[in-house]
């Protein structure tokens, strides 16, 4: 046996060991082996059971938030240019389809300042929002069609990314989050949670927008909204608003008068984590601010010692602690009910706020028994298929059929190991891809073996026949595999989750098949011939 064959045999052995390690690790007991297998081979919802949620993104919320941001910006910019107005409001779209009908009404603009007003709008929102005069003093802003489409698409994309972060933060790595339908106007997101039998906590986590704001307290607490407004003579300042506090242990909520403009927001956070208070043992969520926000927060707290600062989450006041000293880059959110709430709040803050509200349209729970039946049926089909194929190869190709069987087994090992290393999820369509890969692997071996037979019939020696057989069959194998990979790429690009799983599994199997059919099978033939004193016989 020459050194080239020995080198290839060592390379194959190393690959086998790496694959086995990826599947079962280094177990020291049977229980650990089973645990490693279950940990590394992740099953999808259709095999493992779990929950499936159909969510709808309330796109109209994103349009409202955008309009509110423009109104706030105008209220800051117009006084700087000496432009007076009497009223600035927006409409209130209630449905997904009406989101792009958002409009902002600005009334009471001095006619002599109309040119300056139009210039401010053009400089800030020209091309994205259209300014239309209603009369000599009133104007209306509407969103451009192109900007509306972009806002819909961006909102849906950001919602999917944020939901995915939240779910992964819970440790549900086998879950899938994807858009349902091909249009952003559908605004529907499919969330699959394998192994989750009670999705109540997940639903609450996903529905929480997690818009965190730290705002200056202007007054409070008050027992009611009316009392809060009455403290200001019934008229709030331009930078003031009434916010409701959360309800704790059945007690009535408090009401606070807060500044409209927050000191810092959730976008200014670098990190957030749950922790237990060293004073009373209660749970709280600590956060760390970015560098710029830390400087801004430090200036504010230094100027407001002994004043209150409200911690507002999704427009509800969580707490309003007193500022006892200058705070720079970190803070603590107190008043939480327990460890789970502290963990969920920290996770929400790390994942980022949702750009719009989420509504659960549909919820389904899939029992593990259906997945168990599918696994059993798939296993029986796979074993039966492999058994028939192996029997045929051994009968028809005699001892060379062992070669094909070894390549087939290694193909399966590589495929399963790849799924483990890539953290891929095995679904029922994925099992179909595995079984189809078996057929493709056998097809490749049949092509090679028949080529070798033709060369032997032509009178070539065993070594020359093997060499010619592999060379002539190689291009055919590559051609068939490339066309199948192209088909799988199309399935992956345009298919849904299960179809993508089938495509991924089949592609991995095809790549493994090229390696086993061409490299491994050739090495076994060369090994067999190299062990003979006179390489003149070949059982095929």
Image (spheres, rainbow, N blue to C red):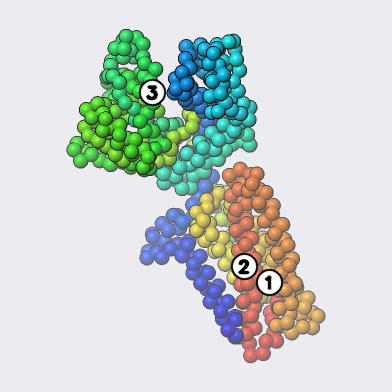
Sequence order check: which comes first, mark 1 or mark 2?
Answer: 1
Look at the image and tell me in which quarter the N terminus lies. bottom right
Q: Nearer the viewer, mark 1 or mark 2?
A: 2
> Which image quadrant for residue 436?
bottom right
Disc 2: which residue: 515
Decide if residue 83 is on the left or right side of residue 469.
left
Q: Residue at x 46, y 56 (%)?
A: 40
Q: Residue at x 69, y 79 (%)?
A: 539
Residue 334 appears in the figure: yes
Q: CA distance from mark 2 to mark 3?
A: 64 Å
Q: Whole-percent x and y of residue 103? A: 56, 19
Residue 284 appears in the figure: no
For mark 3, does the 10 Å Cα neighbourhood hold few (<14), some (14 to 19), or many (20 or more) residues?
some
Q: Which mark is residue 395?
A: 1
Q: Residue at x 39, y 17 (%)?
A: 238
Q: Nearer the viewer, mark 2 or mark 3?
A: 3
Sequence order check: which comes first, mark 2 or mark 3?
Answer: 3
Q: Which mark is residue 260?
A: 3
129 up-or-down from 7: above or below: above
321 up-or-down from 347: above or below: above
Label 1: state its secondary structure. Answer: helix
For mark 1, does the 10 Å Cα neighbourhood hold few (<14), some (14 to 19), or many (20 or more) residues?
few
Q: Whole-percent x and y of residue 49? A: 49, 43
In the image, farthest residue toward the bottom: 533
Label 3 close to label 1 by CB (< 8 Å): no
> Which image quadrant for residue 331?
top left
For mark 2, does the 10 Å Cα neighbourhood hold few (<14), some (14 to 19), or many (20 or more) residues?
some
Q: Nearer the viewer, residue 525 or 359?
A: 359
Decide if residue 277 is on the left or right side of residue 143.
left
Q: Nearer the viewer, residue 375 or 35?
A: 35
């Amino acid at each position: 046996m020459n050194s080239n064959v020995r080198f290839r045999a060592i390379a194959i052995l190393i690959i086998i060991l790496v694959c086995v390690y990826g599947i079962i690790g280094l177990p020291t007991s049977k229980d650990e082996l089973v645990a490693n297998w279950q940990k590394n081979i992740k099953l999808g919802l259709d095999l493992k059971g779990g929950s499936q949620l159909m969510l709808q993104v309330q796109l109209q919320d994103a349009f409202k938030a955008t309009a509110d941001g423009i109104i706030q910006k105008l209220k800051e910019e117009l006084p700087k240019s000496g432009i007076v107005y009497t009223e600035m409001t927006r409409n209130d779209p209630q449905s997904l389809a009406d989101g792009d009908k958002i409009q902002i009404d600005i009334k009471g603009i001095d006619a002599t300042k109309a040119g300056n007003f139009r210039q401010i709008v053009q400089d800030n929102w020209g091309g994205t929002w259209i300014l239309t005069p209603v009369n000599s003093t009133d104007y209306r802003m509407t969103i451009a069609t192109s900007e509306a489409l972009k806002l819909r698409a961006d909102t849906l994309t950001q919602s999917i990314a944020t939901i995915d972060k939240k779910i992964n933060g819970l440790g549900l790595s086998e879950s899938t989050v994807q858009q349902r339908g091909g249009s952003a106007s559908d605004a529907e997101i499919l969330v699959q949670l394998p192994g989750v039998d009670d999705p109540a906590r997940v639903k609450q986590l996903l529905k929480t927008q997690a818009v965190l704001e730290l705002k200056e307290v202007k007054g409070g607490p008050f027992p009611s909204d009316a009392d809060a407004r009455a403290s200001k003579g019934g008229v709030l300042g331009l930078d003031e608003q009434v916010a409701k506090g959360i309800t704790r242990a059945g007690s009535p909520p408090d009401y606070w008068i807060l500044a409209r403009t927050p000191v810092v927001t959730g976008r200014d956070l670098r990190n957030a984590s749950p922790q237990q208070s060293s004073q009373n043992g209660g749970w709280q969520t600590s956060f760390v601010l970015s560098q710029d926000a830390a400087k801004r927060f430090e200036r504010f707290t230094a100027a407001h010692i002994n004043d209150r600062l409200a911690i507002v989450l999704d427009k509800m006041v969580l707490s309003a602690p007193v500022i006892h000293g200058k705070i720079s880059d970190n803070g603590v959110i107190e008043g939480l009910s327990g460890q789970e709430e502290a963990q969920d709040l920290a996770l929400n803050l790390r994942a980022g706020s949702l750009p719009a509200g989420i509504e659960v349209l549909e919820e389904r729970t899939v029992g593990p028994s259906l997945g168990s039946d599918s696994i059993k049926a798939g296993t029986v089909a796979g074993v039966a298929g492999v058994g028939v194929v192996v029997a045929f190869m051994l009968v028809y190709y005699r001892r060379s059929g062992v070669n094909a069987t070894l390549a087939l087994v290694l193909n399966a090992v590589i495929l399963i190991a790849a799924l483990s290393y890539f953290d891929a999820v095995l679904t029922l369509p994925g099992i179909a891809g595995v079984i189809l890969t078996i057929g493709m692997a056998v097809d490749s071996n049949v092509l090679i073996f028949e080529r070798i037979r033709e060369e032997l019939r032509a009178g070539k020696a065993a070594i020359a026949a093997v060499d010619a057989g592999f060379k002539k069959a190689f291009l055919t194998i590559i051609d068939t595999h490339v066309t199948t990979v192209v088909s799988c790429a199309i399935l992956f690009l345009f298919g849904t989750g299960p179809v993508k799983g089938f495509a991924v599994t089949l592609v991995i199997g095809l790549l493994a098949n090229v390696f086993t059919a061409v490299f491994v099978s050739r090495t076994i033939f060369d090994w067999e011939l190299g062990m003979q004193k006179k390489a003149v016989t070949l059982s095929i």
